[in-house]
Structure formats: structure tokens, C-alpha cells
Amino acid sequence: MRAIAAELYATVAEAPIISPHGHVSPSLLAEDERFPDPATLLLTHDHYVTRLLHAGGVDLADLGVGGSDFDPRTAWRLLAGGWHRFAGTASGYWLEREFEELFGITDEFTLDNADAVYDRIDAALDDPQLRPRALFDRFRIAVLATTDDPLDSLEVHARLARDRVVAGRVLPTFRPDAYLDPESAGFASRVERLLGETAQPHRDFASYLTALESRRAHFIAHGAVSADHGVVEPYTAALEPDAAEQLFQAALRGELDAADAREFRGHMLWQMARMSVDDGLVMTIHPGVHRNHSSSTYARFGADSGHDIPTGVEYVRNLRPLLESFGLERDFHLVLFTIDETSFSREIAPLAGFYPSVYIGAPWWFIDAPDAIQRFRSATVETAGFYRSSGFIDDTRAFLSIPARHDMSRRSDAAFLARLVVEGRIRPPRAHRIIADLVDAIPREVFKL
């Protein structure tokens, strides 16, 4: 089985990377500056890493989280002193691969050699081949999608497309959450800005929808292929226009109670599906996260500081109004993600095994790791096969980890396919076709690339 897995992996090991959902800033490539220092590059902005150090007693301020003043070398020593905490974790694996592949560091990382490793990486960062654009091409990235605010001018994307500074495509992604959730901070002022910048003459629900449609069109004109929705729950509701208008006006006044706010969010997720049917943007849903779980940490360091915690997700009932309206539309692509693994076999795979619009999103965030990927395949393939899945999604801000993440996924899928071959459940030629499609044809089809 190991020999078959190695053979399968070898056929895709050097294949170009398609990354249709992630959070790397396009400015990284546009500016193409030297990375500042090892700690800022590999530690400070990676909340997978900072959260475990915090759990072990390190103050996030000492790691530079949230823009805190910090000494990079001291932060690096804190990482070295807590390195044992990352054994067996995906974060430890990514970092070790980056140490080895990019900087030639193969020794065990310890407090004793922390300064030497820091100096070696810092010196290497002077090399022009370790600038973002050179790495983008070295990583063989064919497609990289970013995540962008609906009112972003996308000027940076336009410049990247015009100047062709990298070989692959860099695409924006429409992320409207803060404009759809009446309980998000600054919702009313954000909507007013949306209406103003799209020159809407009225402040009614119809104009609000027109404004969102206008911005989606702007994104499509700049190469966007998908719209992403990071919701707490995938609740959807199809409302009559009068009811939607009443909720919208109350939302602008800040007068919605929790139940009405949920109803408005649910209707807007339904509206986003309607718009995707009309304009062709792939709709991805990333639910089930309790954002900013620690109030005191959020007050000190802001969002994305390591305390977003997974919650349970229910799709079948929540999504039924949306699927009743649009689920049989064959040009509509809806990719369902989860970090509640119980929903893969119970809900998502059965839905994707019937609705032509529904695809199974790859494991993301806490479960984009080897064992979780094996569980994911075991939970979904017997019900929906391989071709109702999305292909791997790295969903990362950590630019340097992208090749390690995709390589891990390819190895994991090769191992899973090898087991099916040895057990006589699929034939070797079919396994070779599947492993190739998982890294290329499948994500291209799902994300309309």
C-alpha cells in the first residue's frame, strides 16, 4: 500500500497549485518587499501558532499580536522554548517544512539554537529569490484567490493583472459578511457607505440589493469567481419583500432583536444564493465559528488573535429554504464547508450526493491536517464519491505554508486511494485519474476556473 501511495503521489507532487480560497493579501505581491524578520514572518500573524503558545502561558503581547510593540528575537525564543507544544500539530508540520524547504534547516528547533536559526533565516531573507513574487512562481501557484471587502477598489488586483508580475492568476473574492449581519459592529454606517458609493437614490431594501449586485459585478470584472460567507450558522429564509423591507429599516435604526436579526441574516444568505444564480459567482459557506470567544483578549488584541472557537453546525434544515429555491439550478455552485466533522457524513455528503449545485468543501482551519483528511474522505467518499468534493482549500494567511499544505493534502489523498486499490475497491488506473483530478480538474470545475 505504501508503494502504491508513493507512486500515486509522485504523479502530482510537482503539479501546479490551485488555491481558490485563502487570505493572503494581494499587496504582498504588489509591493514585493523583503519580509521584515523571522518572527514577523512566521509567528506573529499566525494565530494557529500564537494560540498554542498563549495556552502554554505566553502573553500574546510578547509575540506582537494585534500590533503590540515587541522584540522579534525575544518572541522567536518564546517560540523555540514552546516548540515541544507543536509536536503532532499541523502548525508544527507547516513550520518544519518551511524551515527545511525554504531555509535548509533540518536540525531540531530548540531554545539552544534559537538565535542561530533566527540569524540564518534573517540572512536568507536578503535573497531576492525569497521575495513574495519569486516565491509565488517557485511555489508553482497557478491560481491564488484572496478575500476582499465588497467596497475594496480592487486596484491592487487590477495592477497585478495588468503588470503580470507573477505567472499565475491572483483573483479577488467577494466577502460581504459585515454588510449582511445587522449585529456586526458598524452595520448601519457600512450599509450607508455601500449605498452612497454605488450612487443609490433611495435607502430602501431594493436599493440595498442593487448596491450589493453592483459590487459583485465589480468583482467579476476584476476576475472574481466566488463569494464567501463566514456565518455562525447556515440558516436561510425566503421572505416576502414587505417583510424584508421592515427588517432592513429596523436594522438601519439598530432596533432588531436577536430573532429578527437572525431572520434578516437568513434572508440575506438566501439573497446571496439568488445573486449567484444570476451572476455565476460560486457561493462558499464557512459556518460554525464563535468569533472572539475571549472578551478580554478581543479588547486587548482585536479580532483574529487566536480565540475563534468551532461550534456545531446543522445544514439540512437550515439550508432547505435556499435549496428549495435554487438547489436544482445546474449553473449554481454551492460549496459547503464545516469544522464540525459530524456533519460530513450525516448532512453534507448526502446533500452533495443529490443536489447538482452542492459540493463538499474540503477540511479547513482546525481540520486541514493529515488524520482529519483521512476521516473526511472516509466520511464522504462512500456516499458522494470524490467528484462532489471541492479539491483542497488551504484557507491561509501564511503565504509560505501554501506549498506544504497542498503537499500534505496530496500525500493524504494518495494514501487514501492506495488503501482502496489494495482492498480491491478501485482499480489502479482509476486511482491515477482521481489523484490528478483532485489537484486540478476538480477545483477548476467547482470554482469555474
Image (cartoon, helix red, strand yellow):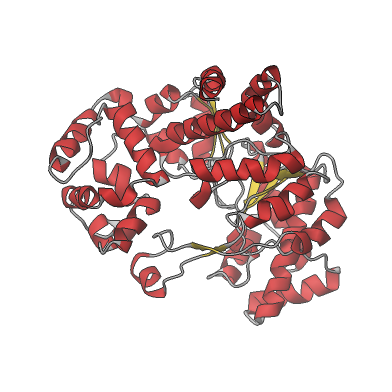
Report x, y in % for residue 34: 28, 34
Q: Between 380 and 251, which is closer to the camera in this rendering?
A: 380
Report x, y in % for residue 259: 70, 79
Up/down of 42 relative to 408, above or below? below
Quarter occupied by the C terminus: top right
Up/down of 250 relative to 389, above or below? below
The answer to whether residue 372 shows anywhere in this view is yes
Q: Is residue 443 left or right of residue 132?
A: right
Q: Between 2 and 163, which is closer to the camera in this rendering?
A: 2
Q: Between 216 and 177, which is closer to the camera in this rendering?
A: 177
Up/down of 436 relative to 377, above or below? above
Total labels drawn: 0
Q: Residue at x 56, y 69 (%)?
A: 184
Q: Between 141 and 233, which is closer to the camera in this rendering?
A: 233
Q: Is residue 335 left or right of residue 306?
A: right
Residue 194 appears in which quarter of the rendering? bottom right
Q: Residue at x 81, y 60 (%)?
A: 320
Report x, y in % for residue 59: 25, 64
Q: Residue at x 39, y 27 (%)?
A: 135
Up/down of 328 relative to 4, above or below? below
Quarter occupied by the N terminus: top right
Residue 104 appears in which quarter of the rendering? top left
Residue 52 appears in which quarter of the rendering? bottom left
The answer to whether residue 282 shows anywhere in this view is no
